[in-house]
Image (tube, coloured by chain):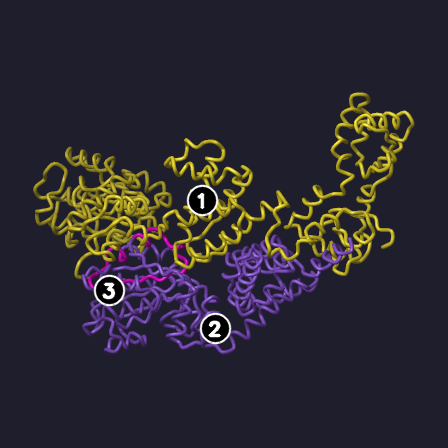
Amino acid sequence: MAWQIVGYNKLIDLLQRSLRSGRLSHAYLIAGPPHVGKMTLAVGLSQAVNCESGEPPCGVCRSCQRIAAGKHPDIKVMSLLSAERPKEKPRTEIGIDDVRDMQHEASLPPYEGRYKVFVVDGTERLSTEAANSVLKILEEPPPRVLILLLSSREHELLPTVTSRCQRLEMRPLSASISREVLVQRWGADPEKADLMARLSGGCLGWAVSALADAEYLERRRQDIAALNAVVSMSYRERFNVAAEWTRRFERSRDDIAGLLNLWLGWWRDVLLVRAGCPAAVTNIDLKSDLEAQAAQFITEEALSAAGSVFRAIEQLSVNANPRLVLEVLMLAIPGVDRAKTSQTVAGKV
Amino acid sequence: MESLVLYRKYRPQTLSEVAGQEHVTRTLKNALERQRIAHAYLFCGPRGTGKTSTGRILAKAVNCETGGHGEPCNACTTCRAITEGTALDVIEVDAASNRGIDEVRDLREKVNYAPNNARYKVYIIDEVHMLTDAASNALLKTLEEPPPYVIFVLATTEPHRLLPTILSRCQRYDFRRLNQPAVVSRLAYICQMEKFQAQPEALNLIASSATGSLRDAVNLLEQMFNYFGQHMELAQVQAALGVTGDRRARELARHLMARNTAAGLQTLNSVVRDGLDLRQFHRELTDYLRQLLLVKSGASSAVDATAEDTAEMQSVVAAVPLEHVLSVVKITGRLDLRLDNYSSLPLELAIVECGLEIQQKAPAPEAHPQEKRPEAQPARPVRAKAPTPPAAAVPAMPAGAARPVAAKPVETPQPAARPAPAAPVQETPLKADWNKVLVAVKAVNKNIAVRLQDCEPISIENGVAVLGFGHSFHKDKIEEPEHRKLVEDTLSKVMGSPYKINCTLQVQEKKPQTQQAPQGHLIKAALQLGAKIINTEEQRHDE
């Protein structure tokens, strides 16, 4: 057994049984949040159907190794990165030409493996034309073809596409399982593993890459400090911050999305501390800061702050004007010195 | 693939086998029996309802060598060839991949050749909504008057995207979503053929989660059997579909009703920890809350539940005011847990919000030990209204404060709403009675009553009521002795003790001025940044 994926025993079990009984479907939809391990599962499944040993996937036979290295001629990955021009900027959608190529290749028998496997990474990025033209082959592909559709935004897919696939859902792992895996498999020290497990929101891929990135925690600490500085800023300063974030957003969307998600997690934690449920917080290493901030705000303020950040993230993801969104967010975040003033006023009265 | 997936293996092969579409199959069967075959059919309907399958059956039926009564025999060479997809005269076109005008031109050319060995040449054009406009138009002439040996079958899930000229040239058959019994009986048939054993309830659950698409249902069935082997039970299917069972949903509902935010969050936390499907959990929660609402509003009979359940619900909501039940239902009901969102955050926010709702309505149960700033809340209303000098330094519109725009952003309406209940104690009786005074005055002199509406009772002390007027015009009128007497008498009568009135001009008169020409650079800066002037107070020591 050399499935590289951990924590999804049920799925593996299902696939193993299907393999053994020869009831493997010709098309699977692997759904789950980003970094949860969809591609890892797809690679494992490709190995399993093409493995040369008796215990697929063995992970050591020539075929398995070539698949793991991405060099197997019968495994095709379609993604936003164009296959012919890997150096170019990623496209915004996967076009109908890629699907036509796939249809043509599917009609040819496998070169050396048992199955031709087509992996579509980011199925929601298929253009409307491409998604529709995939329907026929998805329903009745030629023999010895396996189609794996990966998607983190399943609701954006055509219902006609999902209906033709068996659905493998990869839900985020619970924090305790992630922690265990991080400790046992990647040798992280338990405390750090606990933090990473919570920060990752159950997406192991993310946790592992963050573990490998030695500077990640330091960056995060700085980011949180910068975010928390905002609450004590005047509106004028906040607007400067919004302007700066807008510039960063134009350079890299993920940068700001990550920052806002961090902030959202922070406000969630503040809210949890205030509501008396501190066991569920994410940022356990900064607990004292959390408690300090929880003491500064009333629950309504924390709630509205979390709601505002949440809305901002949503709006940015649907292409709202970033500057407007960020400025509105800055207006909506409660200020800390006002809270303090009101406290002193209360004292005087 | 060694063995076909079940939805391909059990594709219907005769019209009577097509499940749940009797309105289509009977019509087609009758037409076939009477040899009244149209040259163009349009099959439309949602996914997994049998469009393509019916198209293939139709192709077999018209070409079947034994003829029969409208049904294909599935035994003759032609039928078998069509089933296997090797017949030369049944051409299945993927219109989504071959959507251009060139492909249609090619098709038009080939239409003119007579069939090889079958009676009819059948073109099944699938996903026809993806044809380009040019291609659709190029097809029109052929579609209207094809050679006598050609039949077109167009199939699509999105008929609204077709040209009306295409629609009008075809006989249209609308396939419906299958109802649950039809799906269940088909699933049961497949189980029987495959020697699977399944509880009827399990099949019911699969059918209901497939929302009327047979392919989805068969797919699920296959997945379940791959997973659980030859025996399938309801509990297994529930677990696999992420149906939680309603224990924790009820628990959370109880916590929401009992205003216990911390316990509610813990319940949710445990649900998340166990990896349950949050969407499903949310559905169950909303459903249970809805039942609670029905029970609370006295419509217990409308709830589909056992007597014990109803009694339990009654005990849950007995002590809770209807408004609270309603607001909890509203808050949780408007949550939209999108499919790709695995975060528990929306639910968490909703739980906290449900807890807050109560704190606003009844400030008394501020009993959380975690409330670390209990004095801050009563402090705010005082600061907003109290006329004492220290508070005046931090009014809602802090002209003198260090932060220019500390005025609450428009999004948070709480402070605006809060001052009213917590306003200075002495004012309350006067305000409450003021309306009575207005009514009484109106009975005597309508003119004065109208003028009085312009003023606001500010305070009432030592038998003197201070009235603040917005316009000096009205104030002067009221101050005329006879009118003054009328107001004072009425007021005394309503309050039950003698009162004098003292008319003053109120800040409101200044308000328009301030708005036209805001004073001070801080206010100007604030206005530029989007602040709104909500209230203005005189602050002589400031200016």
Q: Are marks 1 and 3 in contact (CB under 8 Å)?
A: no
Query: Is residue B328 shown in magenta?
Result: no
Which chain corresponds to the colour purple? A
Distance, label 2 to label 1, CA atoms, is: 38 Å
Query: Mark 2 is on which residue type?
Result: Glu
Distance, label 1 to label 3, CA atoms, is: 37 Å
Picture quadrant where residue B161 is located: top left
| Residue annotated with mark 1 | B286
Question: Horizontal and vertical percent for residue A218?
Answer: 55, 75
Query: Mark 1 is on which residue type?
Result: Thr
Which chain corresponds to the colour yellow? B
**Relative to B83, residue B487 above or below:** above
> Badge 1 sits on which subunit?
B
| Residue annotated with mark 2 | A191
| Residue annotated with mark 3 | A16
Discs 1 and 3 share one subunit:
no
